[in-house]
Amino acid sequence: MNNSKKIILSFSFVLIVVIALYFVLSSSKKPLDFYEADNNYSVAGYQDKSQANDEITNSRKNIITETVKKVSPAVVGINVTEIRQYESPFGSFFDDPFFKQFFGGRDYNQTVKELGSGFIISPEGYIVTNDHVAGNASEITVTMTNGKQYQAKLIGSDKASDIALIKVDADNLPYEILGNSNDIMIGEWVIAFGNPFGLFEINDKPTVTVGVVSSTGMNLEPMNNRYYLNMIQTDAAINGGNSGGPLVNSNGEVIGMNTLIFTAGGNQGNIGLGFAIPINKIKRIIKELKENGKIDRDFSVGLRIQSIDEGIAKYYKLNTNKGVIVTQVLNGTPADKAGIQVGDIIVQVENYKINNSETLESVFQEFRTGQTITLNLLRDGKSITCKMTLTKR
């Protein structure tokens, strides 16, 4: 083999080796490429996860959470101080003038602190709460959700309806939208806001409970000269301190004011029977309190009545023991002028069905001096209707 062929072969061999090394080195870069691909995949995965979290968060938002966010700023905690007068257990003994000249009176005053809830109804600081929360207060402190506290003054209070109107000296406050309690649907979602057991003071936020409207038009027995008609029943948990807080529908409209709970077996907590005063009634009362500072019920009906028991129902051949029987009509009174007679059975006043004397007493708290009302009666087995004008006492 001559030298030229050897050179060609040597060059060819070197070329083959170089090409082989190129392919080997090229293949050794693959892990880096794969790593870069994996890294790109990790970035994309992170973005997908972030988006997924946003979607989950958005899916957790619903009409309830949005309503809570909307309504909460206008819910307030209320702390009150009352001066209550108590009688000594020896009062009858020391009331004797002989002993009073030596020992004086034995009645005494005591400062009592109470708490409750309320809700702002106007940007200039009008607040609605229960009369049993603030009606007898000597000092009222209102706490906002931003932590600010204001001293409030009592504009007016109505014990019969258990509604009070107070005001703080502030402007541009958040306020609630008042709904229409005539449009309430049984079974619709409702949210109760308030200050149960003073929990509002821990973080300046109202406690929220959710339930449904269980019933409407509930007429309850009078309690402590307070009368509760057409109440809204809900299973949203209401506890001590919730009184005066708003009951809100899923549109964020106030449809009632949390007021009462029923308890059983000595239990002081919620058992699913809570009651709220309808907002339409509250609107009427606070309008009168703003204008007059009180509710004008200065009229006298002039009736003596008795609830119907089984004996009376049997004597009058009634199919039910609901209603009241008139036992006396005073001369010259609205009842006398309306033509009501002894022995008449009152079964309905306006749109209120009368079950017993307590119901009738409650119903007359709904009317005002000068108003003319319609009564449905049974007389000698026949239904009759009469009109009564509630003239000033």
Image (cartoon, helix red, strand yellow):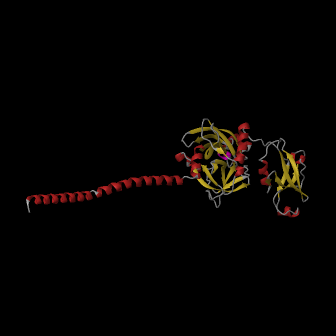
Residue 121 makes an appearance in the image = yes
Q: How many marks?
A: 0
Quadrant where the N terminus sits is bottom left
Magenta extent = 129-133
Residue 330 location in percent, x, y? Answer: 88, 48
Q: Main secondary structure of the magenta part?
A: helix
Residue 99 makes an appearance in the image = no
Looking at the image, the residue that sits furthest to the left is 2
Q: Nearer the viewer, residue 325 or 291?
A: 291
Residue drawn at x 89%, y 47% is 336
Find residue 111 and report its image quarter. top right
Quadrant where the C terminus sits is top right
Q: Nearer the viewer, residue 171 or 363?
A: 171
Residue 384 location in percent, x, y? Answer: 89, 54
Residue drawn at x 78%, y 50% is 363
From the viewer's perspective, tell me whether residue 179 is left or right of residue 63: right
Residue 110 location in percent, x, y? Answer: 63, 44
Is residue 18 magenta-colored? no
From the viewer's perspective, tell me whether residue 32 is left or right of residue 57: left
From the viewer's perspective, tell me whether residue 191 is left or right of residue 305: left
Residue 284 location in percent, x, y? Answer: 73, 43
Q: Nearer the viewer, residue 124 or 80?
A: 124
